[in-house]
Amino acid sequence: MPQLELKNITAGYEDKIVIENISLILQKGEIISLIGKSGIGKSTLLNAISGLIEPKEGKVYLMGKDITGTTGNVSYMLQKDLLLPFKTVLDNIAMPLIIKGKTKKEARELAKNSLAEFGLEGYEKKYPSSLSGGMKQRAALLRSYLFSKDVIMLDEPFSSLDYITKLKMYAWFTDMVSRLGISAIFITHDIQEALTLSDKIYLLYGKPAHIKFAMDMSDKSIKDPLNPKFAKNKKILLDMIEEG
């Protein structure tokens, strides 16, 4: 059974259709990336999955359960980490557990037990302003993970990081997905990032946007920038985006 399945999703705002007839499957432990021109409808698709907007047509299934138009089933990490500056790292991370009904004590204990897994042990009493960009993203991702471990959606999660930090975060993120069996969908404008991290890449195209092309990246060897296929795939995707 797929972790997440979209069937013929059409969605938009008021009378405007932004995305149309989109179907895809996300398996457990898989990373899917969504690429396409700016404003094409990638965030609209995530909004439809998360229930922030209700699709005009189609269904969203989480492990076989229809969650169409309902919130609180999947995690959604926005481009900015949105850590509250007046709360410690531990209290920021514990917030989704409190929202889901845990007492403050229970939430803090569960959050504390997860810090080491995300490389945040020793940072629990620190405030966001004292963290590096990479550590902020780790804290934001852990907060999202504790809200829902089934599916995590990320909107440009690494765009604000410098190149060296990005490379470190790529390695850390793929290791986390592998070890914890995380299923993730992320938006990116960085084609090289999509090729490096993804098991599948979906290219959104047109108005309304639909899936024009899906690239299978399950062969790990083609994720290596030194592999000639990496450059070839990058050109294919860039050319398709330019056409749109």
Image (cartoon, rainbow, N blue to C red):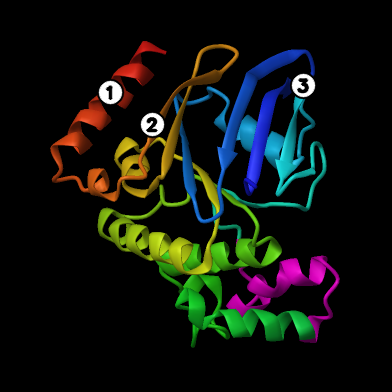
Instruction: Report the amino acid beneath label 3.
Output: Glu
Residue visible at 36% across and 11% down in the picture: 243
User: Cβ–Cβ below 8 Å for labels 2 and 1?
Assistant: yes
Query: Tag 2 or tag 3, which sits nearer the N-term?
Result: 3
Q: Secondary structure at mark 3?
A: strand
Q: Which mark is residue 123?
A: none
Tag nearer the camera, 3 or 2 = 2
Please state which of residues 134 and 31 is positioned toward the viewer in this rendering: 31
Q: How far separated are the C-alphas under marks 2 and 1?
A: 10 Å
Q: Which residue is mark 2?
A: 215
Can see residue 80? yes
Query: Tag 1 or tag 2, which sits nearer the N-term?
Result: 2
Q: Which residue is mark 1?
A: 236
Q: Specify the segment rendered in magenta.
A: 83-105
Question: Which image quadrant for residue 49?
Answer: top right
**Above/below status of 14 relative to 171:** above
Instruction: Report the amino acid beneath label 2.
Output: Met
The spot of residue 191 in percent (x, y) is 33, 36
Residue visible at 26% across and 31% down in the picture: 234
